[in-house]
Image (cartoon, grey):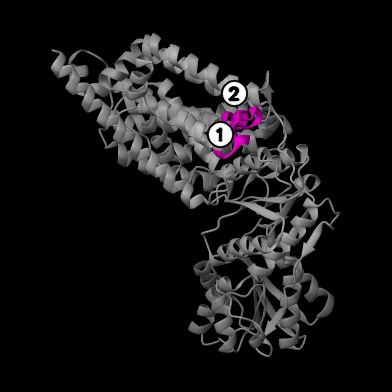
Amino acid sequence: MKKILRFFKKKPIWAILLLLVVIITILAPEFIRRRNLLNILLQSSVNGVMAVGMTYLMINGFFDLSVGTVMGFSAALAVGLQPLGIFPAVIIALLAGAGIGAVNGFLVARAKINAFVVTLGSFIGVRGLIYIYTKEDALIGERMVFSDFGSSSVLGIPTLFIIMLVIAVIAEFVLRKTPHGRNTYAVGGNYEAAENAGIRVNRTVMVNFILCSLAAAVGGVLLASRMNAATPGLGWPDQNLMIIATVVLGGTSLNGGYGSIVHTMGGVLTIGVIQNALNLLNVQSYYNMLLMGIILILVVFADSRFKQARNALRVTDS
Amino acid sequence: MKRILTVLIVLMLAVSGLVFATGDAEATDDGTIVIGHTANNVGIDSYQTTHDQVFRDTVAALEGVSAIQLDAGGDVALQINQVEDLIQKNVDVIVIWPVNGKAIVPAAKKAFDAGIPVLICNSLIDESGYQYVKGFAGPDTYEEGVNAAVGMIEALDGEGNVVELMGMPGYVTAIRRSEGFQDKIADDAPGIEILATEPTDWNREKATRVMENLLTKYQNIDGVYVADDNIGIGALNALKEAGRAGDIVMTSACMFGEGYDAMEEGFIYGSVYQSPAEDAKKAVEVAVKLANGEEVPFWNFFETPVVTKANMDQFERPNF
């Protein structure tokens, strides 16, 4: 019991998620039905994949404002290039995402331009690309195979969620067990110390920018497969901020050096549950946004309070 | 790490236990009707805000009917999620005002597969989605174009040169308003020639620029047809600059508040009244029929009457 309490104190997002699930189930019993829970998993898949990439970058000490429009751009490519075949279209969409990440990474790591400015610039610039490519019109896929995939499931679990889960597990493993993962924590924790320790800092930053954009591109492809279409407005204006908020909910530090994919998933599920519940409960969308904002601040507040308490404890211990 | 894993596993077991405990039992039907509605973007303009409010009020006034009203906020992905949630909620009918007519098709199919009737309101779904929906409730945008042509023919006495400023190319409302106008002119007024049809993307500034160019290009314009009053005001600015306002006849396919004022001042000859209140009432009316299992025709239009200076006092100034 104590252990569980300590866990919740350390990671308030899981406590909040559990609390939400209990409250919502009381208010709207259909929430806990199997189909609805699967529904939430499906709806969380796109954000989940994107949040994985963002977690890497934020542990590294940066964030990426361009993920929203990168998602929209790769969705447009995945649908618009279908005449080439679905597989080539998806590959090109992913490469385009990775390419934008490489540009972001180069400008931040090598040219030493502020990441906020760089990714804000590509956020807007990529939106331009979307409009140029789509000519401001919605693109519709010509093959139903693509959307059949998007709505398919394996053993009753939505395929898109399984994809997200696999990506998350691999990402957590890489983060904990490989040199790149350790370097990411080190660079995010203390940039100069990492550099002095001989870590190739620029390369680490560059790779994480690419991973973040690639994850956004995967999210775009998954989203496009749910609609068999792509509209020019996808990801605009605030999906980037929602993804960052999701990662923060999961306890990843905005200053870098701290965080994990498992807890990011807690943030992803929490946002998925809130959105679903407010729809089931017929709450006007303005309250929806208000509530999300409040929860975000609460979590960060709780997190910092517990951190202070932990630090105080550590001081008295020694 | 191990501790975290233990807790996670316990959590997951707990949740899955609940899942299987409740299973998939259908919600009990207590005989009342629940309408699920996902709107395009309620806060974006007063037309949509009024539509949302009247939808609420109309439902509230009906006995045994309630509604779950959601707002997609202009986000197609969110709207798809909302349709899925409404399916989970097992509502009796789903009313969709599509953010995008193409992207909403798979979601409509999901509702169709779940056996829930879908009604599209205000803006059309892509034709590939017709098979999944029970019908459409909203304005007859083709008829609006026809009505604007009637006004134009009347004002020009069937003779003259006209230019057309249409909305967004590829957008179904723009296309149908354009077709309605052109068909009516071709059928009833062979003496009227349409010199040019130019897209304005529903954008007022662009409409001004396009009109300026048209005035330079053609010296003999007698009339301008605009797809709505927003474009109309843009075009009117160009006409005023050129000193031709009131001299060149303008008709519009959809009246806005500013257009109402311009008509009062004599700058717009004829327009079409599309009321968001009537729009919402029609949607609720058809939705209730669908929820009761009644058959309805596919097209359910509400009245969009012609307005000219002669009868404009019968209409309230639009609040959008």
Q: Identify the residue at image location x=62%, y=42%.
A: B80
Specify the quadrant of the image occupied by residue A209. Answer: top left
Residue type at numbered disc 1: Thr
Disc 2: host chain: B
Confirm whether residue A158 shows in the render: no
Percent of width and height locating residue A281: 57, 44
* Relative image position of residue B28 (x, y in whole percent): 73, 39
Residue B67, can we see it?
yes
Identify the residue at horizontal 83%, vertical 79% (top origin): B188
Location of residue B77 by image quarter: top right
Q: Amino acid at mark 2?
A: Leu
Say which residue label 1 marks. A25
SS under mark 2: helix
Task: Judge left or right: residue A266 versus residue B211.
Answer: left
Using the numbered discs, state the Cα–Cα distance from disc 1 to disc 2 in whole angstroms: 10 Å
Please report the bounds of the magenta region as a residue range. A27-43
Task: Say whether residue A285 is magenta.
Answer: no
For the point 67% across and 29% down, the residue is: A85
Q: Tell me the chain of label 1.
A: A
Which residue is labeled 2 in the image?
Answer: B18
Based on the picture, tell me whether residue A41 belongs to the magenta stretch: yes
Main SS, magenta residues:
helix
Quadrant housing the C terminus of chain A: top left
